[in-house]
Amino acid sequence: MNPQRSLLVFPIDLPQSQAFVRTARQLGFRVVAASSEPLDPAQFPDCATAYLPYVTDAAFDVALADLLARQRIDAVFASHPAIWWHLRALAERGDFPHAFRLCNESPYEMDWQPYGEAYRWAEACHAAEPLAPGEAAPALPVSNYAGLYRSYNLIPGQSDNTKLLALAQIARQLARGDVVEIGALYGKSAFALAWLARFHRVGSVLCVDPWEIASIRNQGESARLINRAVGNRDWQQAFLGFCASLAGFDNVNYLRAPSDHAVGLYREAAAAGGVSSKEFGRTTVDGRIALLHIDGNHRYEAVKRDLETWLPLVGEGGWVLLDDYVWAFGDGPRRAGDELLASRAVSAAFVAADTLFVRLEET
Ligand SMILES: C[S@@+](CC[C@H](N)C(=O)[O-])C[C@H]1O[C@@H](n2cnc3c(N)ncnc32)[C@H](O)[C@@H]1O
């Protein structure tokens, strides 16, 4: 049997170190968490803890070599730049008493990595052509799209970056009106919609979701693996996550109800001119939907019902998006989407990622 490998994480006090420890422990490594500050071992129940002098202390190198040898450590994670560069010099020194390697790239590269990825996506987004015929607002600055990508990818959810690209393109062609999302979960796609609606001055974003198990536990026989998984989610956590994901937007609110009930609440809110919640305050409601994103229960009867109840509220030239039109767990969105395409005149229809994007024709 392989002996358990040991890693040193120093200094443990930085957030990147603690994220690394979680992954290392999940992979079965033994972790020694070290700091030059007093440590409370109770805060690191899964690790051994150790003290090292400050890296500027003349005793540091000897203390490090001693710790590595005593604890049989051959790899070190260091997310503090000054410490990382010092450790790299030691690791490359032929006469350091205990050989070790650094297991992370330079902290400056770690800092830039997610931004580099965001900027590569943002360049492509900025250069992309509009997806439907007709006029389009100019693309936003590349740095704005990079910010959108960074924040969107911090939110749990399965909405991917291809879908984000398509959302960013159609946002340039949206008429004024409300953006309604059925099925928000932690608010990943809602975040993208709110961000784009704000930059392109589209209007308010209303998220419809009951955040409770009853509405989602049956998505059809072929979705039985999903039906089983969703029973294990804490739905109140998802709601709290949604509120945190969308905090800071003044154009967002929610209707916490299943979509067939929420449609009445939406009509009432439109008649009253707005809707209020404790978390988001008051948000204006236009009553005419510029974009409807259907991503709730994916059973055929549920998607069909979402279309029947909400489609009459979508304005001319408005967009209807059916998530999971391409879906490994059932054909509800595909059947309902194909029926929509067969029954309505549309000026654009395409699939991006797994989502069907449809623009209704203006008469
Ligand atoms: C696939 S998740 C949505 C993912 C989300 N759009 C994202 O970007 O991460 C489906 C969501 O639909 C919600 N839902 C299920 N049935 C619903 C219904 N009848 N009306 C509104 N929302 C519903 C669930 O509570 C769940 O949060």
Image (spheres, grey):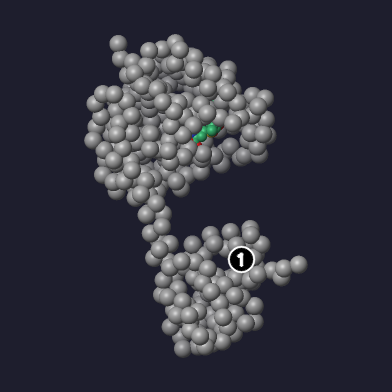
x and y percentages locating residue 255 in the rendered image? 47, 28
Identify the residue at image location x=48%, y=84%: 93
Give the residue type that dot 1 points to.
Answer: Phe
Q: Residue at x 49, y 32 (%)?
A: 354
Q: Nearer the viewer, residue 261 or 49?
A: 49
Question: Where 248 sits versus 85, above or below?
Answer: above
Report the front residue among 227 and 355: 355
Q: Is residue 248 above or below residue 327?
A: below
Q: Is residue 302 visible?
A: no
Quarter in which the C terminus is drawn: top left
Give left or right: position of 175 versus 13. left
Image position, residue 329 (x, y; %): 61, 30
Query: From the viewer's perspective, is residue 57 above or below residue 327?
Result: below
Any part of residue 120 in sight: yes
Left or right for 221, reference 162 = right
Tag 1's secondary structure?
A: loop
Question: In the rendered picture of this protein, how many numbered marks are placed on residues?
Answer: 1
- Residue 321, compared with residue 251, is above or below; it is above
Foreground residue, 327 or 204? 327
Residue 236, given in percent of the width and then of the height, sits at 57, 38
The N terminus, quarter of image: bottom right
Task: Residue under label 1, please give it.
Answer: 44
Badge 1 local density, few (<14 within 10 Å), some, or many (20+)?
A: some
Residue at image position (44%, 11%) is: 343
Picture quadrant where residue 289 is located:
top left
Rendering coords of residue 96 (x, y %): 53, 86
Q: 263 or 85, which lies in front? A: 85
